[in-house]
Structures are given as C-alpha cells and as structure tokens.
Image: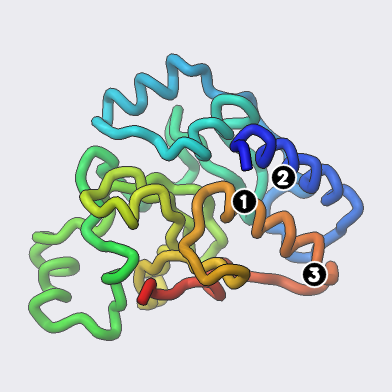
C-alpha cells in the first residue's frame, strides 16, 4: 500500500479515538498532534547524524506531525530534544543489536554485563530514536543506524529499568517485525478495541526473530 494512503487511513482511525475515554491514557487524550517538520529540518537532522530516516517515519513527521500527545506519554520529536533527559542516545553511532540477537539482560555473561554496565565498552544507547515513553522506564524506539538491513527501520521495546532488555516488536497478525506505521496503527487499533478500563503495553509484542 502506498505510504501516503496508509497514513491517511491510520489518521482516519485516530479520529475515532474521540469516542473513547480510557482510564490509562497517560498523555493527553484524544491525541493532539504538533506541526510537521519541514523537509529542510528532516534533511539537516539526517546529515548531522549521518543517517537516513526510515521512509514511513520520515513521511509521517514531514506531512502529518513531528510529535503528539499519544501513544502513551506522546510521540517525541527529533527536533528540539524531548522531555526525557535520562537517556542520551548517540544516533550517529551503530545500534549494537539485531532482530535475531537482541539484548536479553537475564542471559548476559559476566563479560557482556560488564561491557555494558561497568566499562561502557558496549553502548546500548546508539543508533535509534525515541518514539514514546510508556512510563516506568519502558520505551518504544526506532532503529535508524545499523549495519543489519533486517534491523533497520524496525521498532523495539526498550526496558532496562526493569531488567528486561531491548527487543524488537513482533506483529501478532503476521509474526513479522514492526515498522513505524505498523507500530502507530497497532496503537490506534488496540485502543479502539479495548474497553476503557483495559490497558496494553508494547512489551506484550517484544520478541526475537527466529
């Protein structure tokens, strides 16, 4: 499906969220969207970090909105920083994991653990942009700088605060990794589907590509 057509279909469904009154919306609800980025701003960001933004994400933020009050605590903008200052991401460096080899904290060897948490030899906060914060240190991130073609442009679940790890999101509909638009559409579909008292986490989709 054409990216522009798909974006418009997703935003039509977003409009239906005004009918919902979830108890656990986190950020302002129904979603409010900021202004889109200019093509110049997007190009400057790419040049500054030596990357190319995934096409579906780039099209959304330059044609619809660079930020918003949803999902959860809201879509971060890549321009002007973001509310969270605890994670310092080196976007210009390569993401150290792949969809087939994510970060499972519970399975780290002592050497691997030390490389991440003690010596800093492995920087886990590289090669991605923050999409949103669910709360309690749980984030959705988009991989924008990697040597692995299969990993580029995929959305991951990031949860180091609770000693879970960093895993790609797996779409339950087709068991494939999720792109930015997959991620956004899952949010609106799931929110429309759930009762107002229910809640979901992207952590439910975290997995490994076999």
Cα separation between marks 3 and 1: 16 Å
Q: Residue at x 52, y 39 (%)?
A: 56
Crowding at mark 1 (Cα within 10 Å: few <14, some 14-19, many 20+): some
> Of discs 3 and 2, which sits in the foreground?
2
CB under 8 Å between callouts 1 and 2?
yes
- Is residue 105 rendered to the left or right of residue 183? left
Give 45 or 87, whichever is nearer the viewer.
Answer: 45
The spot of residue 59 in percent (x, y) is: 54, 31
The spot of residue 9 in percent (x, y) is: 74, 42
Q: Residue at x 68, y 51 (%)?
A: 27
Label 1 sits on a secondary structure element that is: helix
Q: Quadrant of the C terminus?
A: bottom left
Marks 3 and 1, the one that precedes in the sequence? 1
Label 2 sits on a secondary structure element that is: helix
Q: Residue at x 34, y 33 (%)?
A: 52
Q: Which residue is mark 2?
A: 10
Query: Furthest residue to the front?
Result: 1
Q: Which residue is mark 1?
A: 184
The spot of residue 21 in percent (x, y) is: 86, 59
Is residue 85 among the parts visible in the rendering? no
Residue 50 figure quarter: top left
Give 83 or 92, whichever is nearer the viewer.
Answer: 92
CB under 8 Å between callouts 3 and 1?
no
Q: Quadrant of the N terminus?
A: top right
Marks 3 and 2, the one that precedes in the sequence? 2
Cα separation between marks 3 and 2: 17 Å
Crowding at mark 2 (Cα within 10 Å: few <14, some 14-19, many 20+): some
Marks 1 and 2, the one that precedes in the sequence? 2
Q: Which residue is mark 3?
A: 194
Label 3 sits on a secondary structure element that is: loop
């Amino acid at each position: 499906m054409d990216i522009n057509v798909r974006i418009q279909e997703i935003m039509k469904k977003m409009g239906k969220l005004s009918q919902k009154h979830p108890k656990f919306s986190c950020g302002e609800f129904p979603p409010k969207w900021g202004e889109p980025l200019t093509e110049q701003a997007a190009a400057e960001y790419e040049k500054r970090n030596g990357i190319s933004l995934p096409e579906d994400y780039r099209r959304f933020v330059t044609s619809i909105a660079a930020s918003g009050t949803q999902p959860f605590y809201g879509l971060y903008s890549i321009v002007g920083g973001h509310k969270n200052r605890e994670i310092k991401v080196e976007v210009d460096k390569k993401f150290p994991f792949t969809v087939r080899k994510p970060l499972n904290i519970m399975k780290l060897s002592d050497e691997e653990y030390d490389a991440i948490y003690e010596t800093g030899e492995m920087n886990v906060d590289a090669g991605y942009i923050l999409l949103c914060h669910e709360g309690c240190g749980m984030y959705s991130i988009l991989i924008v700088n990697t040597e692995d073609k299969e990993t580029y442009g995929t959305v991951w679940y990031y949860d180091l605060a609770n000693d879970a790890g960093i895993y790609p999101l797996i779409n339950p509909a087709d068991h494939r990794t999720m792109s930015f638009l997959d991620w956004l559409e899952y949010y609106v579909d799931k929110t429309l589907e759930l009762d107002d008292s229910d809640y979901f986490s992207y952590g439910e989709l975290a997995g490994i590509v076999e």
